[in-house]
Amino acid sequence: MIDLRSDTVTRPTPSMRRAMMDAEVGDDVYGEDPSINLLERRAAEITGKEAALFVPTGTMGNTIAVKLHTNHGEEVICDSRSHVLNYELAMMAWFSGCVARPIATPKGILSWEQIRREIRPLGPHWAPTGLITLENTHNMAGGTVYPTANIREICEGAHERGLRVHMDGARVFNAAVALGIPVREIVDPADTVMFCVSKALGAPVGSLLAGSAESIARARLYRKRLGGGMRQAGVLAAAALIALEETPGRLFEDHANARFLAQGLARIPGIAVDPVAIETNIVIFDVSATGIASAEISTRLKERGVLLNGINEHQMRAVTHYDVDRAGCTTALETLADAVEAGPLSKPASVRSAS
Ligand code: TLP
């Protein structure tokens, strides 16, 4: 199977598996797991923050961040296609008692000007703004990267008004590679950042939430409340440490493969995508003009050995990662061309095979 559904599907490399086997472990709820402690120190160093916390998932990292920075009954400003709003089972409402104040953007990248207009004070009809979240890279906008100047301007504006900024940096290492700068420089102005080791970096499990020592100490308690105290999780941290060391240096290959996929997709009749807009490892393309629903395309691809999902009826998402190489991308393109050429479902099978 060529699996382009997500970069979450990567399996641990041989060096990660060896490190997991040899990992020194202890009870992390007591703060006694040496591998977790090392990973958290490393994450703090990479992000330039005082402290970091290992959490099982990106969703938990974002959930804790929203809780850290808000009070019940506040609003969280985010982009309208953001993960915190659309793919985390309304955790900002469920756990933090907040509602989202979504802003529609063409590329998932918010500007200070847009945010400024949406900030609300407490008033007779209004819930006050509690937090601003930025998603970098932006998943559903197609792996788009925040210009660092935007981040700085947003954080400065927010801080002047006493507001905090959290970055959902699930794929911030991809952003760093695309910009050619260290992660630290990207996340510096944000109050907290969550990044995932389980996505493009290829570790089997886990994310890190980084911020001030005070906020991470509180985050540790929220992690326990959410059931995220994982005991001898050093086996996971060991793989994460390898991921941090070995994977960032090869992410450019995933980005080149994503661009290659987009170029090939643009040549398939009925598929619309702009290859020049591909900045990292995510390609979102439109299949409306094929006349075939994305779910049907997924089914046809699966029968032919390629996994690739729709994000709605007309758009599909391909995510490149180290388990799919250039040859895999070429095969995926050929398979997709074949699946689309078969035509819409409504055509009788005889017509389909004849066309
Ligand atoms: N994204 C997953 C799905 O949930 C859509 C994927 O396949 O891309 N922030 C961002 C920007 C994400 O893309 C994701 C996962 C998360 C947070 C949540 O991470 P997990 O899955 O570890 O809870």
Image (cartoon, helix red, strand yellow):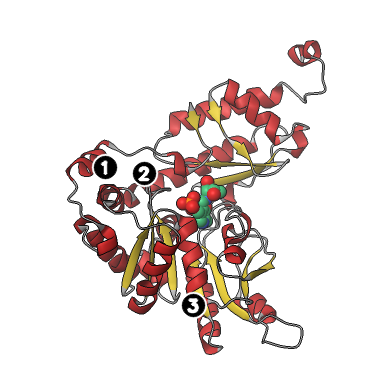
Name the residue located 25 percent from the left edge and 63 percent from the top edge. Answer: 30
Is there a contact, CB below 8 Å, between mark 3 and mark 1?
no
- Place residue 254 in its image quadrant: top left
Disc 1 Cβ-to-ligand 1 distance below 8 Å: no
Give the left or right position of residue 87, taking residue 30 as reference.
right
Q: Secondary structure at mark 3?
A: helix
- Mark 2 to mark 3 CA distance (whole Å): 32 Å
Name the residue located 22 percent from the left edge and 57 percent from the top edge. Answer: 33
Task: Classify 10 Å Cα crowding around label 3: few (below 14), some (14-19), many (20 and above).
Answer: some
Is there a contact, CB below 8 Å, between mark 2 and mark 1?
yes
- Mark 3 to mark 1 CA distance (whole Å): 35 Å
Residue 263 shows which numbered tag?
Answer: none
- 111 above or below 275? below
Mark 3: amino acid: Arg
Say which residue label 3 marks.
152
Q: Nearer the viewer, mark 3 or mark 1?
A: 1
Residue 204 shows which numbered tag?
Answer: 2
Q: Secondary structure at mark 2?
A: loop
Mark 2: amino acid: Pro
Say which residue label 1 marks.
16
Considering only order in the chain, which callout, 3 or 2, is on the residue closer to the N terminus?
A: 3
- 121 above or below 59? below
